[in-house]
Image (spheres, rainbow, N blue to C red):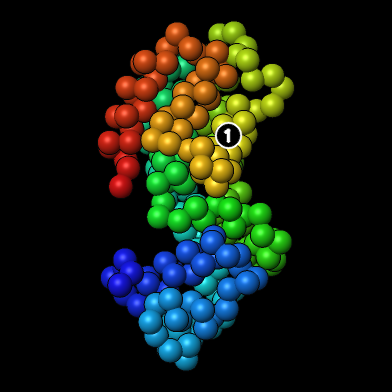
Amino acid sequence: MRPGATARDEILDAAAELFTGQGFANTSTRAIADAVGMRQSSLYHHFGTKDDILGELLKGTVAGGLDFARTVCAAPRPVGAAGAAAALHSVALYDGSLLCNARWNLGILYHLPEARAERFEPFMADRRELRKLYRDLGQRVVELVPAPGGAGSAPLGELTFRMVESLINLRADGLADDHSASQTADAAVVLAGLSAELDEVRALSRDLIAEHGR
């Protein structure tokens, strides 16, 4: 038995395990059907092709973080640099926690050549939007910090986005733990030059996640 309320969910879970374990190219729809315990023909009632399954899984890796980032960007936030940093921190923490705690490390599928194909444009569009929201949140912090932080010339939001995605590789190497997402979010605050406000930012970030997280 696999987790999931429907056969479709079970197919996605089996595919996620196989894609991340033995590779996308090496996994057939027959293998996925066998892992679920159904006929291959039954699988095609839910997904027309293996690419359709991959597309669904890829979109799922960004859906939760994107929804949360959209909400945080649109919501009122505490004033000042600490409030702006808390918004960025909360998105990094929430998004990073999803990547670290998902049942399967699906982020490694980003590196597949197939993931760049036009058929997966919905996933790529969502990822671009999430990246832009990180950049917007980072820019709000930079505009309010009285002195430049240590981020150098690279945009703070872009650096944060890249650090969060690096958790995928840490997890693949067995190096991610329960603190990895929070450490990454904290690092963004330090890069902004707000180390002294870190405790305040963490508290405000927790409030944002409690209010807007699912």
Q: Quadrant of residue 91?
A: top left
Q: Nearer the viewer, residue 66 or 106?
A: 106
Q: Nearer the viewer, residue 71 or 45?
A: 45
Quick one: which residue is furthest to the bottom in this view?
A: 41
Q: Is residue 214 left or right of residue 46?
A: left
Which one is in front, 162 or 102? 102
In the displayed structure, would residue 169 be above or below residue 86?
A: below
- Percent across and percent down for residue 188 are 53, 25
Identify the residue shown where x is 50% and y is 29%.
Answer: 184
* Residue at 45% over, 81% down: 33
Horizontal side, residue 166 vs residue 205: left or right: right
The correct choice, above or below, for 105 with respect to 139 in the image is below
Report the residue marked by disc 1: 163
- Is residue 143 at all visible to an observer of this figure? no
- Foreground of the two, 176 or 161: 176
Residue depicted at 55% across the width and 28% down the height: 138
Q: Is residue 111 above or below residue 178?
A: below
Q: Is residue 193 visible?
A: yes
Could you tell me the amino acid type at mark 1? Met
